Amino acid sequence: MSTDTIETMTSPFAGWAEHAKRELGRSGFRSGRARAAVIDLLALQECCLTAQEIFDGLRASGQTVGIATVYRVLDQLTQQRLLQRLEFGEAARYEPILPSGEHHHHVLCGDCGRVEPFADSPLERELDRLGDQLGYELEGHDVVLRGFCGDCRTDS
Amino acid sequence: MSTDTIETMTSPFAGWAEHAKRELGRSGFRSGRARAAVIDLLALQECCLTAQEIFDGLRASGQTVGIATVYRVLDQLTQQRLLQRLEFGEAARYEPILPSGEHHHHVLCGDCGRVEPFADSPLERELDRLGDQLGYELEGHDVVLRGFCGDCRTDS
DNA sequence: GTCAGTGCAAAGCTTTTGCAGCGCG
DNA sequence: CGCGCTGCAAAAGCTTTGCACTGAC
């Protein structure tokens, strides 16, 4: 509150921090400084972060949180289905799961390294259909597109 | 050669070993015992393997190959676009890329841990369409479905 | 003969675990 | 005031790198 910037207001994860804390309380977790800091930082993002990025981000804002605690918090939140764990390349990335069930996937540029989110309903329907077809009770799915973005593409 | 089993004949990656070796030669790589062993083992698989599984598999068949060499070979093959690197969970997995461009995706069971391949043309078309729509020149994509297989599902 | 290919051991990273102390409920 | 939450340091994977030696061309 108080001095939130425009960026904060337009974050796709607005309201998620409160949701997450409420859910944790409901599940019997106690509240703590470090966990609140991690949750608040995640809620301000546009897209997914690594544990190290979270650790550095908190450091930069003057908050000291042990890296082990960052990992523990990410693990708890993932198990409570409040975070989605993503695995591209080096380190695992995490991003909030919205209570609405809305979610997106990622497209990576192999040249500049950018990670962009995108959402698409037909794709979601197709994936659900596939789960049924395979006889699986689906719990989630990841889609990662790799290529070259508009700025980096060669168009040989 | 010599005592190939039926399984070998029906492997989805039949012919890939020769293709891979030919491509490497064409790119100026010299041939070597360890690399040939890794390539031959991969060509016999149904689905993706981890570096450790390859190392153990070679050991089991009496071939000694350093784990570092396994990683180096996997890295070279991936860079030559002869292998696809996949990242679910713990360790990275690798599987042959067929020259025909045919490929499949994976569905994981969260209970028994099984990994099954599946292919679906409508999904591929949808993903290509999305790349265009996003302004990306797509190079590849990964799709991972997570859930519970027919044997493990609860169907509450 | 030269230089890529290989094995072993050591180093590097990400992630997890042990343990002592702090603080929420 | 008990037990969960935290931080630090150590440990535990997976993966990469350094180096000396072997072997392909």
Image (cartoon, coloured by chain):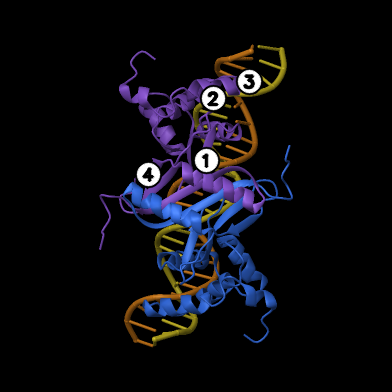
Chain colours: A blue, B purple, C yellow, D orange
Residue A96 position, x and y percent, is 51, 67
Q: Is residue B13 left or right of residue B85?
A: left
Residue sitting at x 31%, y 22% = B6
Q: Mark 3 belongs to which subunit?
A: B
Which quarter of the image is occupied by the N terminus of chain B? top left
**Residue indicated by mark 2:** B20
Q: Are marks 4 and 3 on the same chain?
A: yes
Q: Report the amino acid beneath label 1.
A: Arg
Residue C14 position, x and y percent, is 54, 54
Q: Give the answer, above or below, for where B127 lies relative to A84.
A: above
For the residue labelled by badge 1, is the local secondary structure a helix, a strand or a loop? strand
Task: Give the mark, 2 or 1, whose residue is nearer the N terminus.
Answer: 2
Residue sitting at x 46%, y 80% = A31
Q: Are marks 1 and 4 on the same chain?
A: yes
**Residue indicated by mark 1:** B85
> Marks 2 and 3, Cα distance to the nearest angstrom?
10 Å
For the residue labelled by badge 3, is the local secondary structure a helix, a strand or a loop? helix
Residue B115 marker: 4
Task: Give the mark, 2 or 3, whose residue is nearer the N terminus.
Answer: 2
Q: Mark 2 belongs to which subunit?
A: B
Q: Report the amino acid beneath label 3.
A: Arg
Q: Are marks 3 and 1 on the same chain?
A: yes
Q: Give the answer, above or below, for where A8 lies relative to A127.
A: below
Residue A66 position, x and y percent, is 54, 68
- Tell whether label 3 touches label 2 (CB within 8 Å): no
Task: Give the mark, 3 or 1, whose residue is nearer the N terminus.
Answer: 3
> Marks 4 and 3, Cα distance to the nearest angstrom?
34 Å
- Residue closest to the eye, A136 or A70: A136
Residue B26 marker: 3
Residue B147 marker: none
Q: Report the amino acid beneath label 2.
A: Ala
Q: Quadrant of residue D5?
A: bottom left
